[in-house]
Image: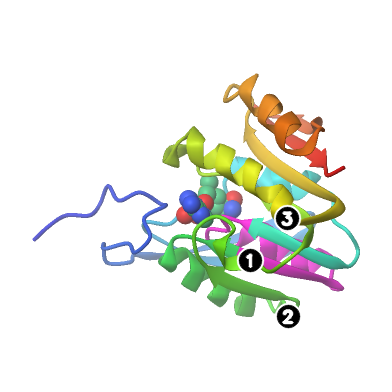
Amino acid sequence: MTSHSNEHYFAETPKSQARFGLVRTCLRGKPFEFTTASSVFSVKRVDLGTRILIESMLLPEKGCALDVGCGYGAVGIAAAKFKPRLHVVLTDVNRRAVLLAKQNVEKNCVFNIEVRHGDLYDPVKECCFDCILSNPPISAGMDTVEAIIHGAPQVMTEKATFQMVIRSKIGKKSLPEAFMEAFGDCRVLAIESGYRVLMAQKN
Ligand SMILES: C[S@@+](CC[C@H](N)C(=O)[O-])C[C@H]1O[C@@H](n2cnc3c(N)ncnc32)[C@H](O)[C@@H]1O
């Protein structure tokens, strides 16, 4: 029998038998519960970068937000919980992550949310967002990270924000450059524990 134990968290259709877990945590002062599974990002706990993005993200009161590469859904579910008038869309290329995110939407009783499967911005081609949130898949390579940045403006409203958490040592120069090319803007929203949250507002 083939072993799939080293399967990437960004596999489109994970082959390994899912081993499920449960993460109970507090985010921005509110309790959340997430079902997690093998072959999905950060099975045992909410990742530190994810947590830093959630704690620092700037959310509009209403309109539409996107969590691109949602994994089991922590960022988008927290955004929807904190801003009940905001419609939040979660997307991921990993079908197992999408199933978990759907379960976690129900588990956390959030209703202003939908989860879609697909690559990058393909599942939301027809949409326009006021805010895009990303904890990008570094293991998938910098080309994917840069595709997330460069593809964003096409699905953003005027003055929308793009917020991305990343380890500070990764793409120290190249990521701010990519932000400037894509949005003509790059600010640091937070720096903490070896991570930074970069933000841009679309012109
Ligand atoms: C670092 S994880 C972050 C997951 C989640 N946002 C969190 O913070 O816990 C990056 C996610 O991007 C997804 N991903 C990788 N490549 C992708 C692509 N081309 N399109 C959409 N999602 C992708 C992975 O499956 C993974 O769930």
- The answer to the question of whether label 2 and label 1 lie on touching residues, with beta carbons closer than 8 A, is no
Asked which secondary structure carries label 2, the reply is: loop
Which residue does the numbered mark 1 point to in the structure image? 124
Spot the residue most to the left.
Answer: 1
Asked which secondary structure carries label 1, the reply is: helix
Reading the chain from its start, which is encountered first: label 2 or label 1? 2
- Frontmost residue, 168 versus 171: 171
Mark 2 or mark 1, whichever is nearer to me:
1
Residue type, mark 3 in image: Leu
Residue type, mark 2 in image: Phe
Which residue does the numbered mark 3 point to in the structure image? 27
Coloring scheme used = rainbow
- Frontmost residue, 77 versus 188: 188
How many neighbours does mark 2 have within 10 angstroms: few (below 14), some (14-19), or many (20 or more)?
Answer: some
Percent x, y for residue 119? 49, 58
Q: Which quadrant holds the N terminus?
A: bottom left
Percent x, y for residue 99? 48, 73
Percent x, y for residue 105? 63, 74
Reading the chain from its start, which is encountered first: label 1 or label 3? 3
Image position of 63 with respect to 11: above or below: below
Residue 83 is inside the magenta segment: yes
Which stretch did the figure color magenta?
Answer: 68-90
- Frontmost residue, 41 versus 171: 171
- Frontmost residue, 134 versus 145: 145
Residue drawn at (76%, 63%) of the image: 128
Which residue does the numbered mark 2 point to in the structure image? 111
How far is disc 2 from disc 1 in space, using C-alphas? Answer: 19 Å
Image position of 197 with respect to 134: above or below: above
